[in-house]
Structures are given as structure tokens and as C-alpha cells.
Image: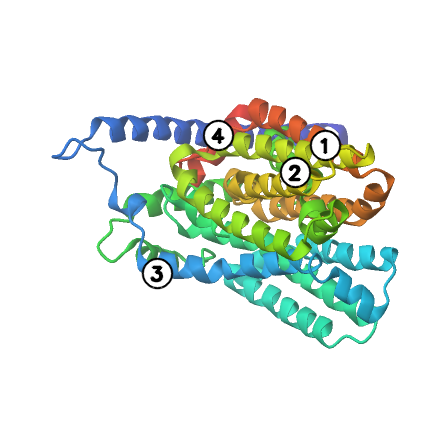
Amino acid sequence: MVFLNCSSLRNKKVKSVESMEEEEEAITRSLLLKQKLDSNHQWSSTSDHGGVQLSESSSTTTSIVVLSTLVAVCGSFTFGSAVGYSSPSESGIEEELGLTLAEYSFFGSILTIGGMLGAIFSGKIADFIGRKGAMGVSETFCILGWLAIVFSKDVWWLDLGRFLVGCGIGVLSYVVPIYISEITPKNVRGAFTSLSEAKCGRLKEFEAMLQILRGENADISQEAADIIEYTENLRGISVDGVLHLFQGKYAYSVVVAVGLMAFQEFGGLNGFSFYTSSIFELAGFSSKIGIIAAAIVQILMTTLGVLLIDKCGRRPLLMISMAGTCLGCVLTGFSFFLQDLHIGKEIIPILVLIGVLVYLGSFELGMGGIPWIIMSEIFPITIKSSAGSLVTLVNWMSSGVVSYAFNYVLEWSSAGTFFIFAVICGMGIIFIYKLIPETKGRTLEEIQASFTHIQQ
């Protein structure tokens, strides 16, 4: 009897799992079918002037969406200030506090240790107190961290402040793109996220918030119904958790998100951004002029990326961006190679400047923001917090390795350092070409359904 009861229970569990998988597959198929029908409808339904008609709720960008996005992307300013601080301040801090190379390398990289800690808890914090609450907590950590740095009189307070700032931006790096992707219409989602409260537990509050975001006269009935149906179905068949991410059906999403983050960092970002002044000084170029030029180029290329992302798409910009970073690494490495051979002394500073500007400008065009956009788009709501924490943690771990090791590798071989980065960027081009799909102009539900469908 005991054997029969155990066998019966096992059979029931197997049937339950099979029915859950069949239900999820049915949801995926229905969403993919809906995507095709919606696409056909958009192309076949034209206005009086011959243009394509889009539903008002999917295309209208209201002032509240713009304002909310601008407030959220202030986190990007905090992030950029923290990352870029160690470059122009290096010589001043070393002189004032008497830091060794090892101590300053630790100061630069401890930001990433804080970022890892913030990344681990970012998903849960965002789910527990909401996206707005998570941004508030992260900014509080950043304020305390900057105050510790400003008033520090020894290396311990300096490191503590840098660590606290890292904790803050570790949360911000996850929650800002997630928040923006959830409040913006699909036709402008990329642009708004590139500038980098959807946590509504009750139905009436959710519909009221969606109405505010889409505009008073917008018809939100279909969009609200789609979101509610998709969310409720997924909640019924999935359980959030890190181990859940390693199921076969999520493998493709995890590989895409983790791969993009790894190539973003191991391609040399923190070497160029944390130690820009050191690179210029090593090449005999004015670090002040170089940093100003780099900042101008980054602003211009970021703006260009925002304007192009929802026109050209994510994938083409990623390809162009990664190719540009590869070229920038090659130029910078070649200039130091000439320096090692004592050839072309006059052109080395200019060549290094061109290489650094090409790298930073190309990075900001696509690789700077698009991996975070794709991360915010491809994971279903049931695993979004765990997936986001994992992906953000990988990003910060990669960042920590590069930022700490850069000075030591640079001492080993200045040319070899950048040639290594160039090879990694070249591998990134192949990765993007082979594995990264286009997500432009599709709803979050459609993207997530298609990813699950690919994995099955």
C-alpha cells in the first residue's frame, strides 16, 4: 500500500509538472500568435494619410512619463560621477593621503565590491519596497558615501565612502532600466531607457497608474488586459528563485544577458574610464585636455545613441559599438607598441587620444546602455528580480576584476593590455552577431514569450 501511494504521488507530481509546462507553452504560443496578428494589423491598418495606425495607448508619451524618466535617470548621473571620479582625482588623492599604487587600485576597485553587494540584493529590494523605494535607498547610500569621501582624512574613510557609493549604484544599475522599461510605451522604450512606479499590487491602482502614464484620453483596456493576463498566468506556473534561472527554458535569456555584461566589462571599460588620466599621462598627452575631450565625445555619442536606438534597433547599434571599441583598443595598443619601439614619438600622444575617444564614444553609442535595456526586456516578471540580481552581479564582478588588475597589467605591458581588450571586443562582435536578437518595437510580453519559445 505504501509503495502504491508513493507511486501514485510521483505520478501526480509528474502530471502536474507536465501540465504546468504545457500551460506555459500554450501561453507562449498565444502571445507569439498575438504578436504576428498585431504586426499584420499594424501594417494593414492605415490612416487617412496612408500611415500606419497605432493604438493610442501604445504610442503616446505623456508628460508624466517624461518627468518620471528624467528623475530616474538622475541615477545615471550618480553612476557616471562615481565611475569617473577615480580618474581625474588620482594624482591629487595619492599626494594628499600618500597612497601607494596598490592602495589606490584598491580604492578604485572597492566601488565594484560595493556594486556586487548592491546587485545581490537589488532585485529583492525593488520587489519588496518598489522601484521608487529602491532608488531612494540607493541614493541614500550614495549621499553617505560621498560625504565620507569628502571629509576623509585617511585611507579607511576614503575606502568606506567608495564602498557605500558602490552599494548605491549597484542597486541603481538594476532598478533604473527596469523601472523605465516598465513605464514607457514600446515605441520609445529604448530611447527612454538609454537615458538611464510599475510595482502596482492591486488592480485598480495598476489601471489608474497606467492611465496616468499613457494619458487621460488613451485607451488602455487592451494593454492592461494583456499585462494582467500574462502576469497572472506566469505567476501561476513559475516560482522566483536563482536556481529557477538555470532551467533549460531560461538558458538562452541568461546566456544573452550575462554574455553582454561580461563583454561590456572585460572589453576594457573600467580600464579606460577609471584610469583615463593615467593613460594620457603615460602617452605624454595632457590629462586635463584629454578628460574634457572624452567627456564631450561621450555626451555627444550618448545623445546620438538615444536618437537612433528606436530607429535603427538594438542589434545594429551593438554591432557598430563593439566594432568601434575594438578599433579604439587597437589604436591605443598600437600607439604604446610604437612607444616601446621608440618610434613615432610625435604622433603617439595624438594616436592615444584618438584611440581613447574612439573607444569611449563607440561604447556610449551602444554597449554602454543597450545591454541594460535588453536585460530589462527579456526576463519574465516571475524571475526578473533574481535574473536582474544575477546579471548585475556578473557585471560588477567583471568590473572589479578589470579595475583592480588594470594598473598591474599596464605595468607588465602597456601595449599588450589594450591588445587583450581588442581581442575580447572582437569576440564580442561574434557573440552579438550569433546570439543577440532584435527587440525593437515589441512589447515586453512578446519579447519574453519569444525568448521562451526559442529555448523550447
Q: Which residue is mark 1?
A: 334
Q: Is 194 on the left-hand or right-hand side of 432?
A: left
Per the model, the C-alpha gap separating discs 4 and 1 is 27 Å
Q: Amino acid at mark 4?
A: Pro
The numbered dot on residue 64 is 3
Query: Label 1 neighbourhood size at 10 Å, few (<14), some (14-19), many (20+)?
Result: many
- Residue type beneath disc 3: Ile
Q: Which residue in the structure is indicated by mark 4?
A: 316
What is the crowding at mark 3: few (fewer than 14 residues within 10 Å), some, or many (at least 20)?
some
Q: Amino acid at mark 2?
A: Leu
In space, the residues marked 4 and 2 are separated at their CA atoms by 27 Å
Say if 208 sits above or below 140 in the image: above
Residue sticking out furthest to the left: 48
- Frontmost of labels 2 and 3 is 2
For the residues labelled 1 and 3, the Cα–Cα distance comes to 49 Å
Say which element carries label 2. Answer: helix
Select label 4 or label 1 by which is in front. Answer: 1
Assign a secondary structure to mark 4: helix
In the image shown, does 201 or 136 lie closer to the viewer?
136
Corner quadrant of residue 334:
top right
Few, some or many residues within 10 Å of mark 4 (<14, 14–19, 20+): some
User: What residue is rendered at 22% in x and 26% in y?
Assistant: 44
Of labels 2 and 1, earlier in sequence is 1
Q: Residue 58: x and y, percent?
A: 31, 44
Where is residue 375 drawn, in percent x and y?
56, 41
- From the viewer's perspective, is residue 174 above or below residue 387? below
The first of marks 2 and 3 along the sequence is: 3
Front-most of residues 103 and 418: 418
Q: CA distance from mark 4 to mark 3?
A: 30 Å
Mark closer to the chain start, 4 or 1: 4
